[in-house]
Image (cartoon, rainbow, N blue to C red):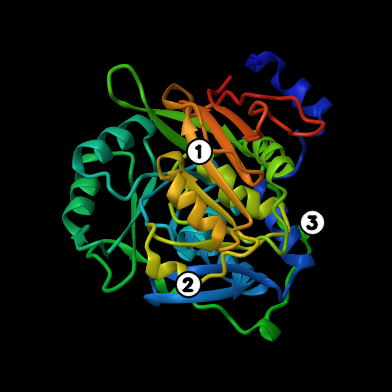
Amino acid sequence: MDIFENINQIDFYTSQNLWGEKSLDYFFRQKTYQNKLKVALSGYSICQDQFITLNHVQCQSIVNKLAEKLLFSGLQNGDIFAIQLPNSIETQLLYIACWQQGISVAPLPSLWRDGEIKQALIRISPQAIICPTIHDGFNYSELMYMIGLDISSIKLLFSLGGNPIDGCIALDEFYIANNAHDIMLLKPEDYHKTDPNSTALISFAKDKGANNKPFYHTHNQILAAANVYNSVTQPSDISPIITPFAPTSFCVCVCSTISWITSTASITCLDGLMATEFQNIDLATSQLLLPSKFGEPLLVDALFEQKLGKLILFEKIQNLKTQEQYHDNIVDVITFDEFAFVPIKRNKVKPKSISQKHKFKLLDGENS
């Protein structure tokens, strides 16, 4: 595996046409402007408690309202927003609203509770955090009160879904999509510009002390990874991206959210892998993203019997097992902690990267 030092990163990525002057938000607005009424996002809605579909104009309308609300609430460029939400349309759009204002997103797994949450928040010192009111039977009220009292950096508490938590700013009303014909979209270049070299995502991995170590990823770094990933998986408008798990890591964010932003594909968000949810979507030609522990032969065979277009399996390199099952439409995304990112397409001879003209194998998430 080739490892590139920070000092060489920008020159290398620039020479590969992977480093640029545009932020994640710019690419989302560009895609929206070019595909106004096409289906953009579908999946479970926390606010509406049902499976819904949004076109690009509706998505942009919601993102604009959310971005303004965050700004008027007191968040600003360079702030950190910790997000502990299940995988839903609200989560995806909140990511983009933050990036529009230059706010860094720190996604936290929805299963984390007092100890892990507090440890992570102390290490990154966010200015705000959002949780659902209730998720999977767990009431977040007590957790939010603890966070508000114990984490001195946090000035703003937000909630989503159901009755708002006392002391929190509820965002539900900002997710109401306006009718397409009532929206006047600005061109991408008419918005303020976010620095593509600023931090966009803070992910976590366990260090040797079993603490959640934060890794900082810039817009340019995750865009570069998404470009390489897209060159292997080739998502398109006829191959929607299906992600049953929240983009709480660098790898999953690149595979799902950023791949969606930088391609013509739509995205379907599901909260967990449940058979009832698959009844809402068409697997044919779709790209399904799963942790590699789900890559059991019987499940893989069953998915492809349903005409699944492509299966994306991701796993940490230290846990990687020899894959006996070969299929032309399986891609393994290998990670090392939260900075290595290697998409590999399986074949019968030897698994190898087919990232076309791109040669890079690693993204270092540490700030230089």
Residue 319 at what x, y percent from top left? 41, 26
Q: Say what secondary structure mark 3 lies in.
A: helix
The one of 175 and 355 positioned closer to us in this rendering: 355
Is residue 60 at all visible to an observer of this figure?
Answer: yes
Spatial CA distance of label 2 from label 3 is 24 Å
Secondary element type, mark 1: strand
Q: Residues within 10 Å of mark 3 (few under 14, many from 20)?
A: few
Residue at mark 2: 174
Q: Residues within 10 Å of mark 2 (few under 14, many from 20)?
A: some
Q: Amino acid at mark 1?
A: Phe
- The image shows residue 162 at horizontal and vertical percentages of 29, 73
> Of the residues under marks 2 and 3, which one precedes in the sequence?
2
Q: 73 or 177, which is in the foreground?
A: 177
Residue pointed to by mark 3: 189
Residue under label 1: 314
Residue type at numbered disc 3: Glu
Q: For this view, does 178 lie left or right of residue 75?
A: right
Q: Residue at x 33, y 69 (%)?
A: 161
Badge 1: few (under 14), some or many (20 or more) residues near its Cα, within 10 Å?
A: many
Which of the 4 image quadrants contains residue 166? bottom left
Which residue corresponds to the image point at 44% horizontal and 50% vertical from the top-left? 298
Q: Position of residue 275 (x, y in %)?
A: 39, 65
